[in-house]
Image (cartoon, grey):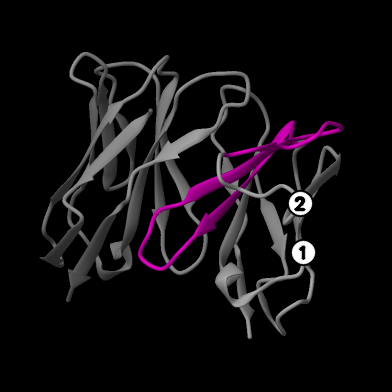
Amino acid sequence: EDKVVQSPLSLVVHEGDTVTLNCSYEVTNFRSLLWYKQEKKAPTFLFMLTSSGIEKKSGRLSSILDKKELFSILNITATQTGDSAVYLCAVNSGGSNYKLTFGKGTLLTVNP
Amino acid sequence: GAVVSQHPSWVICKSGTSVKIECRSLDFQATTMFWYRQFPKQSLMLMATSNEGSKATYEQGVEKDKFLINHASLTLSTLTVTSAHPEDSSFYICSALAGGNQPQHFGDGTRLSIL
């Protein structure tokens, strides 16, 4: 059975701090790993990673994948209160229907 | 781009009512749509995968006669919760996929409360 494990489950930081969120996985036939941000409604897409060692960056957020060690990290620098959300990691493990297996998420709270 | 619209956003109804939720891809054609359920402080649990013009594929433990899925066009999928009961109360979210190497894009979800 495919498994995606995120850590920590929750994290409280102050504005300006840098955070690193972790995602490890055990899946058959890995295709891609995705990060989403979920606030009050449904998840919004952040990154999709398919290759090891290539950092993807968007503003203060960046992510990288290690396919040998089966994990990914999501970094957020100079955090702001608007970064408070649940960050979800999901893995597409192939097959004809491209379905995702989600981790439980990391709840990030950024205090002013 | 990649906007997915889900409607309604909130439903409150009596036990025994059937509820239909719509999921539309607004600016792309979705070969595949997915329906998820999310309980408070839990992650997304896939209920079913819906391909245009064919029967949905349900995950283990999901009753297909209870959760009817129709994917009649490349931009619309519907989920009908039949004879809903309080235990069906949850947050239902759809997502749409434009192609195999693309990320899934999510609708805003539907909060269903059955009294």
Q: Residue at x 45, y 64 (%)?
A: B39
Question: Distance from label 1 to label 2 (Cα)?
Answer: 8 Å
Q: Which residue is mark 2?
A: B65
Labels 1 and 2 in the same subunit: yes
Q: Where is residue A102, by image quadrant?
A: top left
Confirm or deny contact between disc 1 and disc 2 (CB under 8 A). yes
Q: Amino acid at mark 1?
A: Thr
Magenta segment boundaries in residue numbering:
B30-59
Q: Amino acid at mark 2?
A: Asp
Q: In x, y percent, where is residue B11?
A: 68, 78
**Quarter of the N terminus of chain A within the rendering:** top left
The residue that mark 1 highlights is B82
- Residue B26 part of the magenta-drawn span: no
Against B31, residue A52 (above or below) is above
Front residue of B67 and B77:
B67
Q: Position of residue A90 (x, y in %)?
A: 40, 38
The structure residue drawn at horizontal position 24% and vertical position 18%, both measured from the top left corner, is A53
- A40, A57: nearer the viewer: A40
Q: Is residue A10 visible?
A: yes
For marks 1 and 2 on the same chain, the one whose residue lies earlier in the sequence? 2
- Image quadrant for the C terminus of chain A? bottom left
Q: Residues within 10 Å of mark 1 (few under 14, many from 20)?
A: some
* A35 sits to left or right of A9: right
For residue A15, side relative to residue A49 (left or right)? left
* Residue at 18%, 50% in the rendered image: A77
